Image: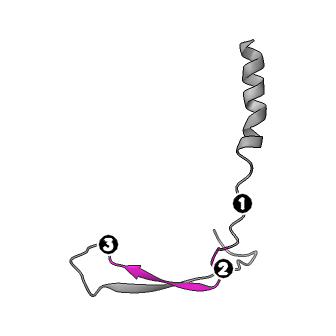
Amino acid sequence: MYYFIFILGCSLIPIIYPYPAHADSAVPLPCTTILNAVDKTDRNAKGAALVYKVKLTPGFDK
């Protein structure tokens, strides 16, 4: 009986919790973001980052 309940529970998990939805609202690349300071005492410390995909060549040393 316990084996049957276990198998039934395992078979219902994909139905109850299906695959997560694809993030259509993801930010397209390239994009920029503002970086805030970790140390809050530096009030004027800010930064910017450019985020993009890097195209590696076959001879790139890892």
> What residue sits 70% from the left and 77% below the top?
56
Q: Which amino acid does label 2 sit on?
A: Val
> What residue sits 74% from the left and 31% below the top?
10
Q: Position of residue 35 (x, y in %)?
A: 41, 80
- Give the CA distance from mark 1 to mark 2: 26 Å
**For discs 1 and 2, the disc positioned in front in the rendered view:** 1
Of all residues shown, which one is farthest toward the front? 16
Q: What residue type is labelled 1?
A: Ala
Left/right placement of residue 43 relative to residue 31 reads left
- Give the CA distance from mark 1 to mark 3: 33 Å
Residue at mark 2: 54
Residue at mark 1: 21
Indicate the quadrant where residue 40 lies. bottom left
Mark found first going from the N terminus, 3 or 2: 3
Marks 1 & 2, CB-CB < 8 Å contact: no
Residue at mark 3: 38
Colour setup of the view: one colour
Secondary element at tag 2? loop
Secondary element at tag 3? loop
Of all residues shown, which one is farthest toward the left? 41
Total numbered labels placed on residues in the image: 3
Secondary element at tag 1? loop
